[in-house]
Image (spheres, helix red, strand yellow):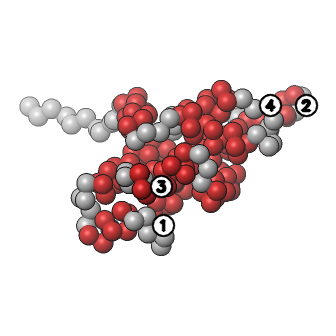
Amino acid sequence: MEQAKQPYSLNSKKVADATRSWLHKRGIKIEEIAELVMLLQQKYYPELTMEECIHNVEQVLTKREVQNAVLTGIQLDLMAEQGQLIPELQDMIEHDEGLYGVDEILAFSIVNVYGSIGFTNYGYIDKLKPGVLERLNDKSLGPINTFLDDIVGAVAASASSRIAHRKQAEREKARGEDTLDAER
């Protein structure tokens, strides 16, 4: 008798672990992303700590949509480094072609999880390119980071948005107002 085929299901912990592992393999530290978050939010929340920024980056990285985008972007950068893309696409990704916007579209899939504040934070940090983003954009260093620079910026923007939503909920709670649970 034929055994019933089980529906496909990938273990969420494996995906989360792979995401963190591949970020590390590509030279990205959670603390570097948290520094971007601090840059984006400290003006609005002077009491914000680096620990809070790290926590929010880690929380963003628990979202499956974010993990999918991170892993997809890293894979495309790796394939470009190895010359495994069709020639026209290879050239665009290898040179981070200005009119090739798919890297930004992938980043938008991350910030989309956290709303319009995430989009504005992403646009700002992508234009400024501080800290780790400057390093990732330095083409003289070797690795292709066409997708990774936008992904890192999007994770930072999302963590910033997450902080803004939580701080609003904290203010409402402190005033004794009904508030929505901001733990998303």
Q: Which residue is mark 3?
A: 138
Quadrant that contains the N terminus: top left
Q: Earlier in the sequence, mark 2 or mark 1?
A: 1
| Label 1: which secondary element | loop
Would you identify the image quadrant in which residue 34 lies?
A: top right
Q: Which mark is residue 101?
A: 1
Q: CA distance from mark 3 to mark 2?
A: 47 Å
What residue do we see at 41% from left, 51% from top? 141
Give the SS element for disc 3. loop
User: What's the distance in space between the residues labelled 4 and 3, CA to CA?
Assistant: 33 Å
- Whether residue 142 is visible: yes
Q: Nearer the viewer, mark 3 or mark 2?
A: 3
Q: Earlier in the sequence, mark 3 or mark 2?
A: 3
Q: Quadrant of the C terminus?
A: top right
Q: CA distance from mark 4 to mark 2?
A: 19 Å
Q: Residues within 10 Å of mark 4 (few under 14, many from 20)?
A: few
Marks 1 and 4 close (CB-CB < 8 Å) = no
